[in-house]
Image (cartoon, helix red, strand yellow):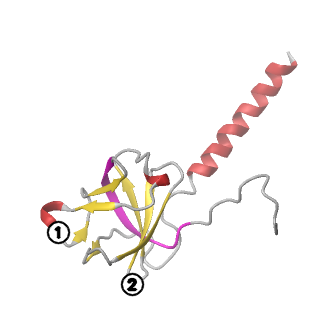
Amino acid sequence: MFRKTVLALALPALFVTSAAVAQQAGPTPGPKSGDPATIPFMTRNDIRTFDSTDDGDGVYIQDARRNWYYVTFFGRCNELPWAIGVGFKTFAGGFQIDRGDTIIAGRERCRIADIVHSGPPPAKAAKAGKAKGA
């Protein structure tokens, strides 16, 4: 009886925690945050850095002018969180990244569902058990 009660009380807390973590992904506060966007003049030097979400649902991209964008996919991009580099495939060799284009991470091709302006990605949580200052 005690185990069932503890499980019944702990289970809703687990779902609330999961929902809070899931809400962290998405555009962060910044200039024009949430406005639809394209990433213009896409060449090999125009993407400065990228930072994927932990679950592979989206990626933050910074262009050469230090503007941040948040990109979401039609499905989950499982290899993106571990990718060292990414590739881009645009329609008809276009010079911008837009909806429907593809991000290539490892052997996986991820179709872009949406691009919006964003602030920088949220700071990653510190790993548990790691001593501070060591």
Tell me which numbered mark, 1 or 2, is placed earlier along the sequence: 2
Question: Given the current orientation, which residue lies at the most extreme bottom position?
Answer: 65
Neighbor class of circle 2 (other Cα within 10 Å; few <14, some 14-19, many 20+) is few
Looking at the rendering, which quadrant does residue 88 occupy?
bottom left
Residue 91, placed above or below residue 8: below
Relative to 23, is 97 above or below? below
Magenta stretch: includes residue 110: yes
Please say if the residues under marks 1 and 2 sit with CB atoms less than 8 Å apart: no
Looking at this view, is 77 or 17 the one in front?
A: 77
Q: Which residues are magenta?
A: 108-121
Q: What type is the residue that disc 2 sits on?
A: Arg
The quadrant in which residue 127 appears is bottom right
Q: Quadrant of the N terminus?
A: top right
Is 56 positioned to the left or the right of 75 in the image?
right
Residue shown at 79% from the left, 19% from the top: 4
Q: Position of residue 27 (x, y in %)?
A: 48, 65
Residue at image coords 26%, 64%: 98
In the rendered image, residue 25 lying in the magenta stretch gets the answer no
Label 1 SS = loop
Q: Residues within 10 Å of mark 1 (few under 14, many from 20)?
A: some
**Which disc number belongs to residue 94?**
1
Q: Specify whether 133 is left or right of 15.
A: right
x then y, percent, for residue 10 = 76, 33
SS class of the residue under badge 2? loop
Which residue is most to the right? 2
The amino acid marked with disc number 1 is Gly
Q: Distance of mark 1 from mark 2, alpha carbons? A: 19 Å
Q: Is residue 16 left or right of residue 114?
A: right
Q: Residue at x 46, y 50 (%)?
A: 56
Q: Which residue is mark 2?
A: 65
Q: Is residue 134 above or below residue 9?
A: below
